[in-house]
């Protein structure tokens, strides 16, 4: 791949993602104050002692934003990886085996997709204990239904190709066909879809936290920070707009990279060894 062929928008997106990842990985070293440390009065303005001001409890907003990047990215990435692992395994298995297994998986997936995602998540999270692994699991299961749809579609396109039929005639098992024949030839579109699902996971997690069923205080995440400081908007305080801008900025950066990957993928031809 020629680096000069990468458009400016993709470079901007990758720079934004890299910046967010650096903040997430080195949050304790970058943040001037602790995640839940009260260091000033309520809603102090930006500048001076505090770069972005303070929040509704007097905590440094800049430090909370950095720690929130770690929490938001970790949860969204973990949920996306888990949803892709589950969705790809089930969709590829359905596409390769066909018959009753394909019909059972697909109809159950249609049933899950018929339920509004946000309402389903709110009901489940309201009943289950407020633990991080439960939040990640619920997000992953709900998102895996979308992954299943696209995974089955691309797998069916590849499953009818000659090299897959040749593998079947050689007596290769389902696992070999999935991981050695289909997966390598669907990697490019799936990589673009992974980025898109990651962006949706960030927005979904922020929505859940804003509604009080996502990341629980005093842990910092961007959706929860918007919720904590939303009342300040009435008084002209911009504390809620800063984490909201961070959510929008990261989602835009991810979409810029995904847009480039999808355009690059659309120019590739299917089949073994292409691309």
Image: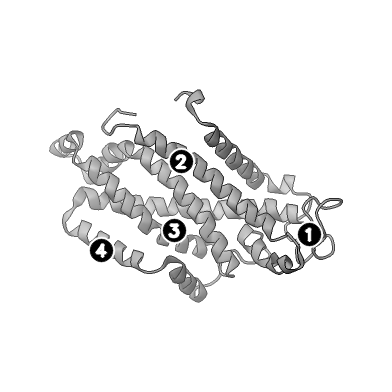
Estimate the spatial distance between the alpha carbons at disc 3 and disc 2, rounded to whole Å. Answer: 23 Å
Task: Write down the residue under mark 1.
Answer: 54
- Of marks 1 and 2, which one's residue comes earlier in the chain? 1
Q: CA distance from mark 4 to mark 2?
A: 31 Å
Q: Nearer the viewer, mark 3 or mark 4?
A: 4
**Residue 217 versus residue 8 in the image, above or below:** below
Q: CA distance from mark 3 to mark 4?
A: 19 Å
* Coloration mode: one colour
Of helix, strand and loop, which one carries label 2? helix
Q: Nearer the viewer, residue 211 or 63?
A: 211
Task: Give whichever of discs 3 and 4 has the lower sequence position.
Answer: 4
Q: Mark 4 or mark 2: which is in front?
A: 2
Q: Earlier in the sequence, mark 1 or mark 4?
A: 1
Q: Earlier in the sequence, mark 3 or mark 2?
A: 3
Can you identify the residue that label 4 sits on? 107
Residue at mark 2: 259
Can you tell which mark lies on residue 33?
Answer: none
Residue linked to disc 3? 140
State which quarter of the image contains the N terminus. top left
Alpha carbons under labels 3 and 1: distance apart? 33 Å
Q: Residues within 10 Å of mark 1 (few under 14, many from 20)?
A: many
Q: Earlier in the sequence, mark 4 or mark 2?
A: 4
Q: Residue at x 49, y 76 (%)?
A: 127
Q: Is residue 18 rendered to the left or right of residue 151?
A: right
Element class at badge 1: loop
């Amino acid at each position: 791949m020629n680096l000069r062929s990468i458009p400016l928008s993709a470079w901007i997106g990758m720079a934004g993602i890299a910046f967010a990842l650096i903040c997430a990985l080195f949050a304790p070293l970058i943040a001037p104050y602790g995640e839940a440390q009260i260091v000033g009065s309520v809603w102090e303005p930006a500048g001076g002692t505090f770069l972005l001001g303070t929040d509704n409890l007097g905590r440094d907003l800049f430090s909370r934003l950095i720690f929130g990047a770690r929490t938001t990215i970790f949860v969204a990435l973990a949920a996306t990886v888990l949803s892709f692992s589950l969705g790809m395994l089930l969709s590829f298995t359905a596409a390769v085996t066909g018959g009753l297994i394909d019909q059972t998986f697909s109809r159950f997936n249609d049933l899950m997709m018929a339920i509004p995602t946000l309402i389903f998540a709110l009901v489940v999270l309201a009943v289950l204990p407020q633990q991080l692994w439960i939040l990640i699991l619920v997000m992953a299961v709900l998102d895996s239904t979308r992954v299943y749809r696209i995974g089955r579609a691309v797998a069916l396109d590849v499953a009818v190709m000659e090299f897959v039929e040749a593998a079947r005639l050689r007596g290769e098992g389902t696992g070999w066909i999935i991981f050695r024949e289909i997966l390598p030839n669907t990697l490019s579109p799936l990589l673009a879809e992974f980025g898109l699902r990651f962006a949706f996971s960030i927005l979904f997690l922020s929505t859940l936290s804003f509604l009080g069923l996502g990341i629980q205080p005093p842990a910092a995440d961007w959706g929860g920070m918007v919720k904590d400081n939303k009342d300040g908007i009435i008084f002209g305080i911009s504390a809620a707009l800063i984490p909201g801008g961070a959510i929008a900025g990261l989602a835009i950066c991810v979409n810029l990279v995904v847009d480039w990957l999808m355009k690059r993928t659309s120019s590739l031809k299917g089949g073994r060894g292409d691309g």
